Amino acid sequence: MKDLVLVTLLLTALIGCWYAYRQNKNSRRHLRRMMKDMESLHKAELALEQLQVRLVSASDRPPPPPPPPPPTKTQHPQHSNTPNTKHTQTKSQKFHFLWCWGAGGGAEATWQTSTETQSRSQNCR
């Protein structure tokens, strides 16, 4: 009877040790995965911070002016009175205005449309 109890206790101890070994191995694997994930998350946060700094610095400085139109070989564009050159100058000036100040017409139209929609919805109530 003593031998049966001793063998049972020994088997229980071996199974307990084996179970603890497996749990330790699984927890270490899980911890390694978490560490890798944390490192990649840290790298992503650093990259995001760098992008935000670049965005802020890019929005603080004015955009570069558009390149001037190439001069014609026969006449200088500012001294010419041909319609084509005037059209080019006007187009360049419009492009420069839009480049510096953004397309205000689109924003105004969106604002006007949203305002009209709000007033219509309030009138229907």
Image: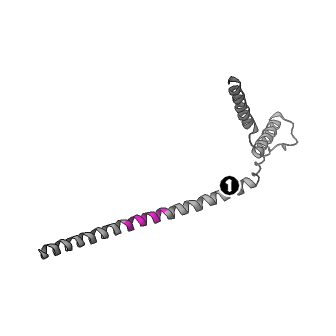
Crowd tier of the residue under label 1, counting other residues whose Cα lies within 10 Å: few below 14, some 14–19, many 20 or above: few
In the structure shown, which secondary structural element does the residue marked by tag 1 occupy? helix
What's the residue type where badge 1 is placed?
Leu
Q: At 24% from the left edge and 73% from the top edge, which residue is drawn? A: 13
The quadrant in which the C terminus is found is top right
Nearest the eye: 75 or 60: 60
Q: Quick one: 109 or 25, which is closer to the camera? A: 25
Looking at this rendering, what residue extends furthest in the left direction? 1
Does residue 112 sit above or below 96 in this rendering?
above
Q: Which residues are magenta?
A: 27-37
Q: Quadrant of residue 61?
A: bottom right
Taking the image as shown, residue 76 lies to the left or right of residue 3, namely: right
Q: Is residue 68 left or right of residue 79?
A: left
Viewer-closest of 23 and 99: 23
Question: x%, y% of residue 66?
Answer: 76, 48
Task: Point out residue 21 in the picture as x, y percentages from the top left corner.
Answer: 31, 70
Name the image colouring: one colour
Q: Position of residue 89 (x, y in %)?
A: 81, 40
Q: Residue at x 73, y 35 (%)?
A: 111
Q: Position of residue 107 (x, y in %)?
A: 73, 37
Q: Which residue is most to the top?
A: 124
Where 41 falls versus 10 (above or below)?
above
Residue drawn at 72 percent across, 28 percent down: 119
Residue, disc 1 = 55
Main SS, magenta region, reads helix
Establish if 72 lies above or below 84.
Answer: below
Residue in the foreground of this view, choosing between 63 and 30: 30
Picture quadrant of residue 50 = bottom right
Q: Is residue 62 magenta?
A: no
Quarter in which the N terminus is drawn: bottom left
The quadrant holding residue 110 is: top right
